[in-house]
Amino acid sequence: MGALRVGVIGGGQLARMMTPPAINLAIDIKVLAEAEGSSAALATTMVGDYTQVEVVREFAKSVDVITFDHEHVPLAVLEALEAEGVSVQPPSKALAFAQNKLAMRKRLGALGLPMPDWAEIQDAETLDAFIEAHGGVAILKTPIGGYDGKGVRVVRSASDASDWLGNLAQYGGSLLAEEKVDFVRELAQLSARRPSGQFEPWPLVQTIQENGVCSVVLAPAPAVDQATLDRTAEIAKSVAEGLGVTGVLAVEMFEARDGRILINELAMRPHNSGHFSIEGSVTSQFEQHLRAVLDLPLGSAAPRAAHAVMVNLLGVDGQNDFVQAYSGALAAHPEAKVHTYGKSARAGRKMGHVTVVADSAEHALAEAQGASAVLLRG
Ligand code: ADP
């Protein structure tokens, strides 16, 4: 067999973290980065604009399969390459649902999957009627271009969104209104699927957000009954199969106070909710993604320890590189596995993460938070 060559579009931390398992499996990983000096600079073979079909076509010539660090490559670019016979995983027809929250809601609705009540909004009257019908409050989202809570707003009247309603063309012509779910917590179901069909879910995790950004992940999610575990794995399988997703899929969900499990968001790539799997699982999400997009047999997603806790290192303005705090953090927290993404600090930016695996969830959380505090103090 010749070399296995995977091309990753995007030079962020996800591409960076695909590199160690690629080395282990002798996969030739190549990255198309947006700029020099990205997180994935070690694997970068080309720097260019992924919105230009000629750039991506040139990159694709050097690999057997194209996959992604992010979901922003224009569908038209991917469709052109697919028409020329390039293997794109996940394919453009699946990515379409990750790029547009309204298209995603429509498709999940057609599949009968559980979601918050929602409506497509093109004018103030429809939005006011939706708010009225949902107790005077709704969540309003821009269907395209949002991430980490940007493009998500709580609205009590259409006048809270006159800027968005006045610029609908910029958001694809419509907005997405959703019931404001009274949730007790947020959960994520990570899984992987091969083009030929094999599907492998990881155990359900709980995600904790701060200011709209993931800050802590508890694996497995505490106090979940078997019926819920079966249900969330089944939901992920239905999404992966129903939307034709290949590679890693993260299904973000709400556990509502009334017990409903509702799908919030989808990510069709390795995801922050799965970073724990590097130390916590037999097969990490990064290795599994590479195996899946190459249509190789998937590895076991079983846990390697009773608990894994991941804490994100979120940047602080004006902070210097926290690498200089390694001595203190590593000495005080020898169980902590520190991952640094090589990015410059900006407030709230994901700069790295810390994972601790342990028999006790409390211990893992305390150690991961302890190490994170020392690193961020600098
Ligand atoms: P993004 O794509 O920017 O991550 P999300 O759609 O995941 O945006 O929403 C960001 C956060 O906003 C969620 O993690 C959740 O805390 C809150 N949120 C989103 N939709 C709802 C909803 N329907 N009800 C209640 N809270 C919501």
Image: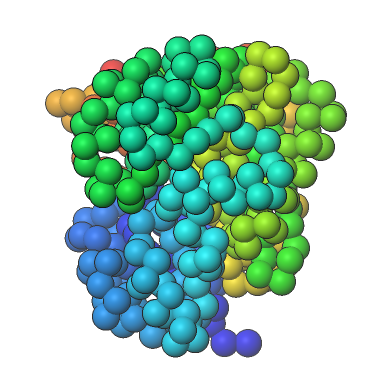
Q: Which residue is rendered at x = 27% and y = 80% of the image?
A: 54
Q: Is residue 70 visible?
A: yes
Residue at the farthest front position:
125
Which corner quadrant of the image does residue 328 belong to? top left
Q: Is residue 340 visible?
A: no
Residue at the farthest left position:
318
Is 198 drawn above or below residue 63 in the view shown?
A: above
Q: Which residue is rendered at x = 44% and y = 61% of the image?
A: 68
- Estimate the x, y position of residue 83 in percent, counting from the top left: 46, 84
Residue at the farthest right position:
226
- Estimate the x, y position of residue 214 in percent, counting from the top left: 45, 29
Is 21 drawn above or below residue 76 in the view shown?
A: above
- Estimate the x, y position of residue 114 in percent, counting from the top left: 68, 36
Q: Which residue is rendered at x = 24% and y = 61% of the image?
A: 34
Q: Is 189 placed left or right of 49 in the picture? A: right
Q: Is 322 placed left or right of 251 in the picture? A: left
Q: Is 233 placed left or right of 339 in the picture? A: right
Which corner quadrant of the image does residue 356 belong to? top right
Is 315 drawn above or below residue 269 in the view shown?
A: above
- Estimate the x, y position of residue 193 in percent, counting from the top left: 67, 59
Q: Is 279 placed left or right of 320 in the picture? A: right
Report the label total: 0
Specify how the rendered protein is coloured. Answer: rainbow
Using the image as rendered, state which of residue 338 and residue 58 is in the foreground.
58
